[in-house]
Image: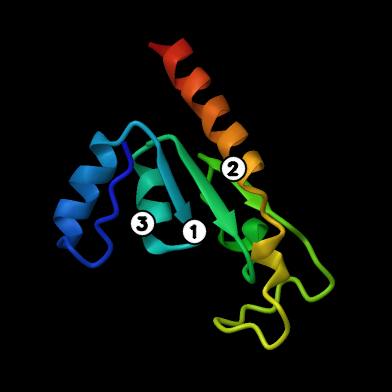
Amino acid sequence: RVVNLAGGTSLRQLMALIKLSDIFLTNDSGPMHIAAALETPLLALFGSTSDTKTGPYGFGKVIHKHVECSCCYKRECPIDFKCMTRIDVEEVYQELQSLIRETVSKV
């Protein structure tokens, strides 16, 4: 079950929810780093930022499509945001399935 609580929790509540989550799908964000610190299985989607510089430290999986303008660090793309639009839904699904299998095998 997917739950979107963007902007609907305090930091303390967010941390508790991340800790209780089976998997955390996120972008390059503060909550991504919280999930990594809490060792919650996570998949982070990267666009204009560098997964090697700001990725989840020591924990988590990343999908990042390197394009000619990577890593520009811009919040709004002046071109066509292909660093994100090249991330395929099927690839995200497969990575999430892989995380589920890894999580189940550890139990």
Residue 61: x %, y % from top left: 57, 41
Mark drawn on residue 35: none
Earlier in the chain: of badge 3 and badge 2, it is 3
* Residue at the spot 28% in from the left edge and 44% down from the top edge: 18
Q: What residue type is labelled 1?
A: Asn
Name the mark nearer the viewer: 1 or 3. 1
- Hey, which residue is sitting farthest bottom in the picture? 78
* Residue at the spot 45% in from the left edge and 53% down from the top edge: 26
For label 3, the residue is 31
* Quadrant placement of the C terminus: top left
* Residue at the spot 44% in from the left edge and 46% down from the top edge: 25
Mark drawn on residue 27: 1
Please, what secondary structure does the residue beneath circle 3 have? Answer: helix
Gap in angstroms between the C-alphas marked 3 and 2:
18 Å
* Quadrant placement of the N terminus: top left
What colour scheme has been applied to the protein in the rendered image?
rainbow
Q: Nearer the viewer, residue 55 or 62?
A: 62
Label 1: how many Cα within 10 Å (few below 14, some 14–19, many 20+): some
* Residue at the spot 44% in from the left edge and 21% down from the top edge: 103
Label 3: how many Cα within 10 Å (few below 14, some 14–19, many 20+): some
Gap in angstroms between the C-alphas marked 1 and 3:
9 Å
Residue 24 position by quadrant: top left
Residue 57 located left or right of residue 35: right
For label 2, the residue is 92
Please, what secondary structure does the residue beneath circle 1 have? Answer: strand
Residue 29: x %, y % from top left: 44, 63
Gap in angstroms between the C-alphas marked 1 and 2:
12 Å
Count the marks: 3
Q: Which amino acid does label 3 sit on?
A: Pro
- Hey, which residue is sitting farthest right in the picture? 68
Earlier in the chain: of badge 1 and badge 2, it is 1
Q: Which amino acid does label 2 sit on?
A: Val
